[in-house]
Image (tube, rainbow, N blue to C red):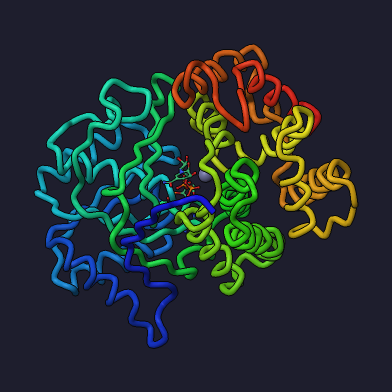
Amino acid sequence: MNSFTIWNPTRIFFGPGADGTHGEAFARAVANLGKRALVVSGGGSVKRLGHLDAVIDLLKAAGVTVESFEGIEPNPNAPTVNKAAEKGRAFKADVVVAVGGGSVMDASKAIAALLHTGEKDIWPFVTGQPKAGQLAGAVPVAAVPTTAATASEVTPYAVISYYEHHEKSTLAYDFLKPLAAWINPAFTTEVPKATTADGGADIISHAIENYLLGGSDSPLADGYSETVIRTVVETLPKSLAEPQNIHLRGRLLWASTLALNGYQTAGRNPAEFVLHSMEHALSGKMPNLAHGRGLATLYPSYFRWLCDTGRAPDRLAQLGRAVFGVTEVSTESAAAATIAKFEAWLKECGLYQSLESLGFAAKDYDGIADYCVKVYGKDGQLNALGAMTAADIVAIFEGTFRQA
Ligand code: NZQ
Ligand code: ZN
């Protein structure tokens, strides 16, 4: 096994609590982080459902003074983040509480960093921009995730878009990790079907990226990742059929937290998150594309590209045997069977489509691929067990055409 380091500082409250007191306990945890909370939320769903007010009431009861910022977009736009930070600064917020999906949690982290530094614009600090890596700290963040998808409630990442430039990029700092999270399946029962499916595709991606490219030195990480992936593969179709089933929602939500907390890769070789790099370039170009939908669209074509270029067929074969009941004996036929089963599962979940059907035009692929390797790559290329050039990325985009 390789060496690794993991730091998971998030105090997690899962579910309502045996006696329904996790909300109060979470609010007390927030009160220990700060006394003036900027509570950040999205475009209105979470407010309409009463979740936002429920959290605000709990915070107030715990002695926290609250200011609210509503209106973070899916794929949060940097100018909106800046506006929220301005409001937080005027309010003298000393803690930021996110109530929403990954977009709200990511925006909250960026806001927390701006509040700490006194900077007014987050965009220059994201990967690929002039001040990348130069943030010095953040006020504490707490999170109430309302989607099962990103694991942002425990990750050091914030993914920010800049609509005007058609760009999307990341912040990654340990000090952005939320210090408290109330992970309550009851907040996710009204997530629409398509968004639920998108989230499932995202959870799998977090477990699968390094599984495929990180080698086979860590059987524990493999078993952990396979369990997370199998849980989503088995649970998502059931949850789509029974959206109100809280047990199924709970499994997806906890799988999402576990998929990106560091344990999923521990002991394997480090490897780039190339699916994420490609997807972020796509949803940067088209901000109304949900992250999970973009990933789902890329999976089959990416898997085929891996096999066609002789990369990691053994890992695809192992995945199929562990998760999809693949029984083919040779590595090549087992890998091919895995891809076929994965495609069938995507179809079952309504996640099977081409980039064209999502509104992308083939003439834009070169530009999107160039952006991808420029921002996320080194020397003009990504690394996926060897060079992954802009031409490879275009080929993967083009390979989605058959998923019409
Ligand atoms: O905006 P509102 O009206 O609140 O509606 C949202 C939004 O339209 C809705 N929603 C959220 N919770 C709901 C709900 N609707 C009903 N009931 C609820 N309980 O869902 C829609 C999508 O929300 P969003 O937050 O955008 O989705 P998701 O959680 O998938 O987050 C996606 C963002 O996270 C980034 C993605 O790139 C994307 O920007 N990621 C963040 C990561 C991280 N921080 O570690 C890692 C991921 O790989 C990912 O890149
Ligand atoms: Zn993701």
In this view, 185 is above or below 257: below
Task: Give 266 or 25, whichever is nearer the viewer.
Answer: 266
- Specify whether 137 is left or right of 288: left
The residue at the point 74 percent across, 59 percent down is 323
Q: Residue 290's image quarter?
A: top right
Residue found at x 56% / y 28%: 383
Image position of 85 with respect to 286: above or below? below
Corner quadrant of residue 57: bottom left
Whether residue 232 is visible, yes or no, is: no
Q: Is residue 335 left or right of residue 353?
A: right
**Percent x, y of residue 385:** 62, 32
Q: Residue furthest bottom?
A: 19
Task: Give x and y (percent) for residue 14.
Answer: 42, 72
- Position of 260 compared to 222: left or right? left
Q: Residue at x 35, y 64 (%)?
A: 181
Q: Position of residue 37 (x, y in %)?
A: 18, 57
- Please state the total of marks drawn on the protein image: 0
The C terminus is located in which quarter?
Answer: top right
Tell me residue 392's x, y (percent).
Answer: 66, 21
Give the quarter of the figure containing the N terminus: bottom right
Q: Residue at x 84, y 55 (%)?
A: 326
Q: Is residue 13 visible?
A: yes
Q: Nearer the viewer, residue 67 or 117?
A: 117
399 or 237: nearer the eye? 399
Pick the front one: 340 or 2: 2
